[in-house]
Image (cartoon, rainbow, N blue to C red):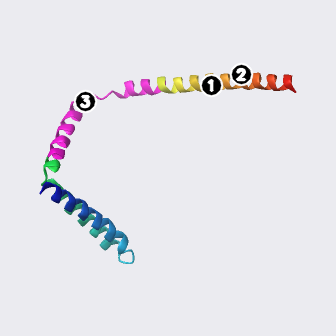
Amino acid sequence: MNKFKLALAILSIIAGVVGFYYLRESAMVIRILLLLLGIILGITIAWFTDQGKQFYTFSRESIEETKKVIWPSRKETMQTAGVVFAFVVAMAAFLWLVDTGLMTVVRYVMDQEG
């Protein structure tokens, strides 16, 4: 029965999307309402499956965990961004020097052979 409910939920979402595109000559309000109806119906059906209940529990626990996160202050964020920016600039300069050096070596070798 659980698989049947999931299949019905997926089919209702697909029906909403297909209806949105099938009624392309209708008013946009009708098309959007049909799409939303399919999505809401699919979510409602999926809510009553075991997987839907597990997903709801997982989502609720995830929200609780994000509330426990200690977010960095503005100062820490700016310092980290500064370090990253400085590293990117230093790496770009290093790669430019390596590229220029290799190009010089290649030109020198190519002139020697010619």
Q: Nearer the viewer, residue 10 or 82?
A: 10
Q: Residue at x 37, y 29 (%)?
A: 74
* First in residue order: circle 1 vs circle 2: 1
**Is 71 situated left or right of 6 in this image?**
right
- Amino acid at circle 1: Leu
Mark on residue 69? 3
Picture coordinates of residue 106, whole percent (x, y): 76, 25
Marks 3 and 1: CB-CB under 8 Å?
no
- Is mark 1 in CB contact (under 8 Å) with mark 2? no
Could you give the CA–CA distance between mark 1 and mark 2, rounded to whole angstroms?
Answer: 10 Å
From the viewer's perspective, is residue 14 above or below residue 97?
below
Dot 2 or dot 3, earlier in sequence = 3
Nearest to viewer (mark 2 / mark 3): 2
Marks 3 and 1, how far apart at CA:
37 Å
Quadrant containing the C terminus in the rendered view: top right
What residue does disc 2 label? 101
Point 71% across, 23% down: residue: 102
Count of marks placed on residues: 3
**Residue 64 magenta-highlighted:** yes
Q: Which label number is shown at residue 95?
A: 1
Residue furthest right in the image: 114
Give the x, y percent position of residue 26: 35, 77
Q: Closer to us: mark 3 or mark 1?
A: 1
Q: From which residue to which does the magenta span run?
A: 54-82
CA–CA distance between discs 2 and 3? 47 Å
Q: Residues within 10 Å of mark 3 (few under 14, many from 20)?
A: few
Image quadrant holding the N terminus, namely bottom left
Residue 3 position (above or below residue 100) = below
Check residue 60 for magenta coloring.
yes
| Residue beneath the point at 76% across and 21% down | 105
Q: Is residue 80 above or below residue 24?
A: above
Which element type, helix, strand or loop, lies under badge 3?
loop
